[in-house]
Image: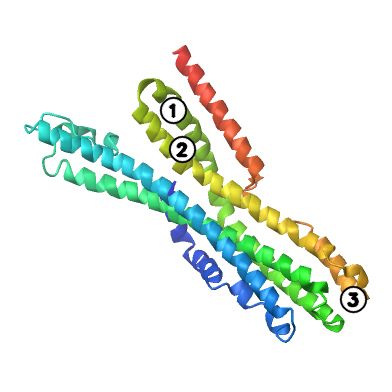
Amino acid sequence: MSITKMIYYLMAPRRFYMLLRLVCRHELLQTCELFAAVSDLPVAQPLKQRVADTMDQSWISTRRQLMFYLLCCIGILLNYFVNSLVVNIYHALTEPDNNYEVALPLPSLYPNWMDKGMTFPYYHLPLLLESCNLYICGMGAVSFDVLFIVFCMHGVGVMHSLSHMIEYATSPLIPQERRVQYLRHCIYQYQRVEAFALEVNNTFRQIIIIQFILSLFCWGLVLFQISIGIATSLTIALRMLMYLAAGGYQIVIYCYNGQRFTTASERIPMAFYECTWYEESREFRQLIRMMIMRANQSFSLDVSWFTKMSLPTLMSMIRASGQYTVLLQNLMQKN
């Protein structure tokens, strides 16, 4: 899966670069004309402070998810690497005649070199290659999934910021004659947010279906290995738990953040409706009605054309993987 994601990187580098630059520079907010339009009004300072607090919370949430995911991936990779390294060092000290089979992180890749001991290059070359394999597996997944977290949480932040802007549309801090202009700037910002949400969805919707299919089988296999490992080897069970924390968390990232993305977008039409539009001018009310109808279709992150990234999808994945585990257990008992 990490190799597939790296190939996708190479196929669309410009798209990822443009999205990442837009997010890191906060271009959706920097290009918003609303702040310049209200710079001479009392509402400018509280609005800017509220938007800044919202975006800070978005980046804090991004950092928390990144650190947890990075630690999970580092944990399982170190488990594979350090475990094999310690076993080999122990055998080298206790059996100096090289009469043992070396332990590698991925031993099945080099079965003919297992009985060569730690002689050069039968041990050093496979260790180097498999260490690179582990690094690519872990960091390839982390780099791709973290980009999704950054894009998604930035989208959530700008949607919440837009909702705050709309809430101030009928504030006493804005003169009556300038509220229509203020609302128009909110509509322009909505268009930019909508374009960003569509671009994020188009970037990830097709590649994610591969991740969901592979994770479905991986969850079932890992749960099956855990059920067997508890009775036979606690080391295997612990390793599978660590793998589940790293590999299983990938789908949690997509579904959890996809749900937050959709929930934040559903707040936008409510913000238009909840302001005191009924006390405003006819033009203001017409704009509000138009935007309630337009924003009523919430943004979402899709898994190809099958489903959406949401918490119900996550629960469906968990149930399906549990059924797959039960099927493997039944097959094992019959054999």
Residue type highlighted by circle 3: Glu
Q: Is residue 287 left or right of residue 5?
A: right
Which image quarter: residue 284?
Answer: bottom right
Judged from the image, the secondary structure of the residue bearing numbered disc 1 is helix
Q: How many marks?
A: 3
Q: Position of residue 276 (x, y in %)?
A: 87, 68
Residue type highlighted by circle 2: Leu
Relative vertical location of residue 265 with respect to residue 211 in this rendering, above or below: below
Q: Position of residue 133 (x, y in %)?
A: 32, 47
Q: Residues within 10 Å of mark 3 (few under 14, many from 20)?
A: few
Real-space CA distance between mark 2 and mark 1, rounded to the nearest whole angstrom:
10 Å
Judged from the image, the secondary structure of the residue bearing numbered disc 2 is helix
CB atoms of marks 2 and 3 within 8 Å: no
Which mark sits nearer the N-terminus, 1 or 3?
1
Real-space CA distance between mark 2 and mark 3, rounded to the nearest whole angstrom:
55 Å
Residue at image coords 92%, 68%? 278
Which image quarter: residue 279?
Answer: bottom right
Q: Position of residue 62 (x, y in %)?
A: 53, 58
The disc at residue 283 is 3
Residue at image coords 47%, 64%? 13
Q: Mark 1 highlights which residue?
A: 226
